[in-house]
Amino acid sequence: MEVNTENIVKQFLYQGEPVAQQFPALHQSVYGKPLIYFDNAATTQKPYSVIHAISDYYSTINSNIHRGVHYLSQKATEAYEVSRNTVASFINARSSSEVIFTKGTTDGINLIADTFGSYAVNEGDSVIISAMEHHSNIVPWQIMCGKRGATLKVIPMNEAGELLMDEYEKLLDETVKIVAVTYVSNTLGTVNPVKKIIELAHLNGTPVLIDAAQAVQHISIDVQDLDCDFLAFSGHKMYGPTGIGILYGKEEWLEKLPPYQGGGDMIKTVTFKGTEYNDLPFKFEAGTPHIEGAITLKSAVDFITELGMDEISAFETGLLHYASTQVREIPRVEIIGNAIAKTSALSLSVKGVHPYDVGVLLDKMGIAVRTGHHCTQPVMDFYCIPGTVRLSFAVYNTTDEIDRFTESLQRAINMLV
Ligand code: PLP
């Protein structure tokens, strides 16, 4: 796609300053070179507001939640539930009881694969995923299908990295109990037509889980508008802490599903005869959770909201187009993933050169990229390549950084061939 790169915004401003000023980890040199961080799909850097919120939590209200009558416990519980409400508004959930704190996307998908599997999947049934899923949205379904005697069906994609919707329609039959697809491919950058995918599944009477790990930080998400049944994402990919994530589920589904783990907090009463489970969302939050992570996820959501999701999307799309245009000029470099709808991730294959070697040289030039299969081995098999060099953008990246990347990539290739 030809793009006019002249109008692309060079950097994102926050209160009149480059937004990168808010991210202390970006202001360092590695191997004597100023750091450029293009590994945002793996995890993002954290702004001061999140870092300070973590420190504030431990300096003031640190205590266990939901159980204490004392002041600190009440304050921590309140902050934990305020954060849940903030996330609920951020994704436009009907109610905060539909928002479950998890460890991250992987944890949320495993929760649904396990509980939904035992609730609704039997021998001869099937599950649909897509050809571009992260291993986190493949392996949990394989495990569940193995246990339940069900089959995994895969929506194929074309060379550009777009799902074949006609083939998807053909896969949807009465055996399909759930569809689980990624909103955005972490390797190809493809933005999938999830609304259509959900609509078609619902016509078949099938619920849908959306893996939003690579969407929630780039695209405005409205779970009611999407009408998805489940949606999972991770805090650490959206400027928040690691070890915390969100699983959204429609209340009618979460009410029906059995608990995932047993323990404290997920119960109302326990006797040796049996247990009465707690109401939503606590039924799915057994044990002491990642309290500090959950509370400070609010700061990450507030940060994104303050910058404006539409502005973030427009800016990052600009960076993607700018970088794509630049790398197309470099001999031997091929973009893997050329869907019309793309965001943030740019995967490159360099003819005759192993991606790892490119990554190591770029690192020595101060540029952090990811190399390898990006936990999408089936995607690598599809393109018959060992891996890619992946850049993935965040709000603090700039066109100047992309210029430096392009020069450095060219230098690296010259050294390697
Ligand atoms: N799904 C996608 C599309 C991802 O990109 C990732 C991580 O890169 C995951 C799931 C897993 O996320 P986490 O490791 O935070 O659970």
Image: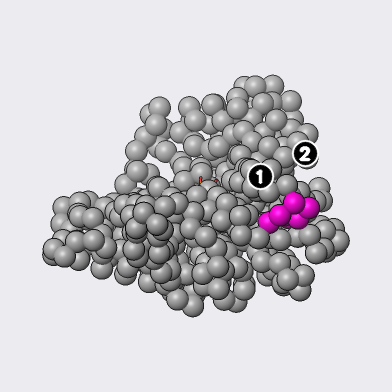
Question: Which quarter of the rendering shows the C terminus?
Answer: top right
* Mark in the foreground, 2 or 1: 1
**x then y, percent, for residue 47:** 34, 54
* Dot 1 amino acid type: Lys
Please identify the dominant SS of the magenta region.
loop
Circle nearer the N terminus (2, 1): 1
Indicate whether 69 appears above or below 184.
below
Point out the stretch of residues depicted in magenta: 121-128
* Dot 2 amino acid type: Tyr
Indicate whether 412 appears above or below 153.
above
* Neighbour tally class for label 2: few under 14, some 14-19, many 20 plus, Cα within 10 Å: few
Q: Nearer the viewer, residue 24 or 213?
A: 213
Q: Residue at x 40, y 64 (%)?
A: 276
**x then y, percent, for residue 286:** 38, 54
Local SS, label 2: helix
Q: Which residue is mark 1?
A: 147
> Cβ–Cβ below 8 Å for labels 2 and 1?
no
Q: Nearer the viewer, residue 271 or 8?
A: 271
Residue 156 is left or right of residue 289, and the answer is right
Local SS, label 1: helix
Return the mark for residue 383. 2
